[in-house]
Amino acid sequence: MKHAFKFLAVAGSGAALTAAAPAWAAATPPPSVNSGDAAWMMTSTVLVLAMIVPGLALFYGGLTRAKNMLSTMTQIGAVACLAMLIWVMWGYTMAFGEGGSAYVGGFGKAFLAGVTPDSISGTIPEYVFASFQMTFAAITVALVLGSTVERLKFSAAMVFAAVWLTIVYFPIAHMVWASDGLFFGMGALDFAGGTVVHINAGVSALVASLILGKRIGYPTERIVPHSLTLTGVGTGLLWVGWFGFNAGSALGANGAAGLAMINTFVATASAGLFWMLAERLSGHKGSALGFCSGIIAGLVAITPAAGNAGPFGAIVLGAVASVICFYAVTVLKPKLGYDDALDAFGIHGIGGVVGAIGTAIVYAPSLGGPGKADYAMGGQLIVQIEAVVATIVLATIGTVIAVYVAKLVTGLRVSADVEREGLDLGEHGERAYNY
Amino acid sequence: MKLVIAIIKPFKLDDVREALTETGIAGMTVTEVKGFGRQKGQTEIYRGAEYSTNMVPKIKIEVVCDSGLAPKVVEAIQASANTGAIGDGKIFVLDVGQAVRIRTGETDQTAL
């Protein structure tokens, strides 16, 4: 949806623009920057940055043990920085360069060739569009690390990030968001990146944690979050930043952004409460971590549906995703026995799948969605499932390659001594807390 | 001289300190400790992973006093730290060989 808007506009004032333009502008006007759109997109871009540092860094950091706090925060910050540099070198062109295939963009914009302050994408400067999309690449690769913390080497995280972005993220971003991309052509609905960001990161996290192996002592020893306070702070920052992520994905300050905004409020609110409710119904106490987990599950689920659902569809979607993620994390994970340390798969992977498939349902006008009267839910459901399956397959294959490259170059995992003593001291020579 | 060690519930510290001051005790050492006795611990759950902690947080008080005063000290702690519930703690009394005040070099009774 978002990039259809972009590319139509680039092609010379798309249908939506022309329809909205006054009569005297009937002749095709040259593309120009709308300062309101540009201001909102610049704001959205830095909101997404705040999701990574400090949002995700605190959210994940608080969930690890105190001895691994700095390692977790530093890995997140560092892979995000690496993603930004790679993005301007070859990432942007692989995702959005013209003249590529259905699978990857052309290389004409490598090192941002030809992009100038006068370049326009839709109604915003192309530099702003490229920056906005850059933050998506940065947060996605950082999300993957949620499953590998407390044992993955810093150097391995960096090598993994470089390879994974190149062979997994950029191609999938192209397929979903570029007008000549495979999923885009299929008509898959993904407003803000449910497949590209969340299913992609979640599945990759699961595969990476399976290859990496469990943490020493998991699940017999006591491995508990060292600061749910910081996790709560991170949760709040993620929620606030997510308005840039979702409402920003309208690529303008418009009605679609407004719809995405209200959905990002209500789907999340419903999911936060429903996780706690699921805990109560399972005979436990409603917990702070459950509240935070529900918030994230709701944000993940509403991402593909943000501009593709009505507010009440969004509330239901948030609730359903929250309860399914709750069972994935508390029942499925222990049964299967893998060590997805911070539940990157359980929340982003599972929540992403629920959101992507659910988008086809809540899009229906009969359920308050923005679909046209002749909207065919069955056909859309099949398209959504195809996009989900294709993303899972690509993410799995690409992650296996990226992890083994990282293993070859760096050894992948810290020594048992470093793991016991903590990665903060072993990998960075510091402690997070010196009382 | 006697060393009186008392393990008490953390929220009873102020009461115990007050009672000990009334018996004429001029100083004590307090440490936050963990341990277990008959009181059972708590269960914590993080995203479905359950951990039962059998170590319960307690406060350890150490008081050195004149041998004659020791029974009164024990009695004061026993009375002030008592809630009647399991987990109120324990008191131990040990003999002390020597005491020295570091600043002046005074020893034994005068050092207390």
Image (cartoon, rainbow, N blue to C red):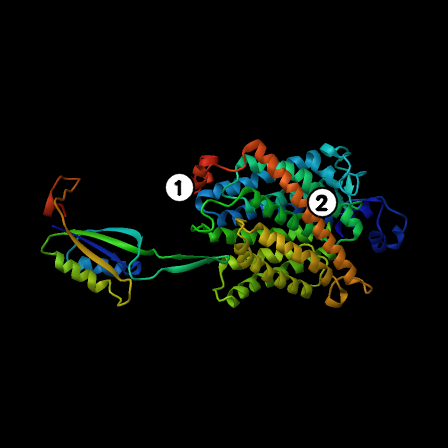
Type of amino acid at the residue the image marks with label 2: Ala
Residue at far front of view: A336
* Percent position of residue A319, x then y: 61, 63
Type of amino acid at the residue the image marks with label 1: Asn
Disc number for residue A434: 1
- Residue A83 seen by the camera: no
- The residue closer to the viewer here, A52 or A363, is A363
- Name the residue beneath numbered marker 2: A173
Within the image, what quadrant is residue B7 found in? Answer: bottom left
Up/down of A353 relative to A136, above or below: below
Dot 1, how many residues are within 10 Å of its Cα: few (below 14), some (14-19), or many (20+)?
A: few
Dot 2, how many residues are within 10 Å of its Cα: few (below 14), some (14-19), or many (20+)?
A: many
* Percent position of residue A118, x then y: 77, 38
- The residue closer to the viewer here, A407 or A223, is A407
- Residue B21 seen by the camera: yes
Does label 2 or label 1 sit earlier along the sequence?
2
